Image (tube, rainbow, N blue to C red):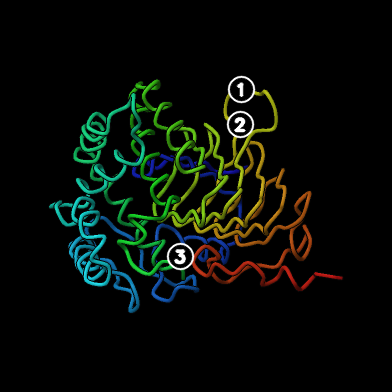
Amino acid sequence: MAACIHSAQTNRLSCYPNRSQVDDHLFNSAKFCRPNSPDHVSCEPIAPNKPKTTHSRTTVDDDDLWLRMKDEARSDVDQEPILSSYYFTSILSHDSLGTALGNHLSLKLSDSSLPSGTLYDLFLGMLAEDQEIMNAVKDDLRAVKERDPACISYVHCFLNFKGFLAIQAHRVAHKLWTRGRKILALLIQNRVSEMFAVDIHPGAKIGRGILLDHATGVVVGETAVIGNNVSILHNVTLGGTGKACGDRHPKIGDGVLIGAGTCVLGNVRIGDGAKIGAGSVVLKEVPPRTTAVGNPARLIGGKENPIRLDKIPSFTMDHTSHIWSDYVI
């Protein structure tokens, strides 16, 4: 039988199948962590009161992140003075990441009948009162900067990456949803879908350190759960299988990588550290640290003895290893 544990910190339900002691050790070492090296399981755990390990290339701690973004903004203005007003309004005139994010989202999602001032008050209120959301925002910024080679700076992600912005708008919508303000939450979902081509139901539960790479066409259903440190590419659907009600959407574990054009359908579990190849259709559970690919998806190495991954795929962003081993032209 699978053991199900509810975590109040992440507000998500994790169900883990029985494993050997070796599997448990590797599984636990990958939970809720940021890597010292971006491709190995060995990493420092994220603890609320413990300083985070600084990545030699990109990672900065919470106190320095906003200061780094303002420095990046000033550098961009020096290179492109024509953008000085835009950068001042979006970054340099604000005294915190929360106020800047509330302002940026409100301008992006407003329209003639939904004023930006109304949205700003809403977003700022939610961000100011919930430190967990702001911690997740910072982890998402780091995730994009560390995993996406197209991201040249934190401020570039903040201003221009619609996957990052869609996730942050969802965090506010989800908070509204859990408080019973469902009409407003659904309105935000609709505006995000219209502006960013990302459709995440406000009931979905999403962890921290999320990368939606390109993000166009991502669809996430109401009862879906996405763990921490997950990377998802464009045109991915986490959906149901029909008109069934109740808990009907996928549960994505920590450290999972889901390739472009993939459909994961039904209340199935994708185990921690698993990898789903591009264009796959997943209808059954995928064990931790394995690779599934195809339509319908099959485990690389076979169901009885699947090849086990020794690196966290969401960190490496490696879409080809172990898949090509069985590839035949």
Which quadrant, please, contains the C terminus?
Answer: bottom right
Percent x, y for residue 133?
A: 30, 44
Residues 191 and 34: in front is 191
From the viewer's perspective, is 246 left or right of 11? right
Q: Is residue 236 depicted above or below 170 in this figure?
A: below
Give amino acid for label 1. Cys
Which quadrant, please, contains the N terminus?
Answer: top right
Give amino acid for label 3. Ser
Q: Which residue is mark 3?
A: 29
Give amino acid for label 2. Arg
Q: Is residue 145 depicted above or below 244 in this figure?
A: below
Residue 186 lies in what quarter of the image?
top left
Q: Which residue is mark 1?
A: 245
Residue at the spot x=39%, y=66% of the render?
A: 145
The CA span between labels 1 and 3 is: 35 Å
The CA span between labels 3 and 2 is: 29 Å
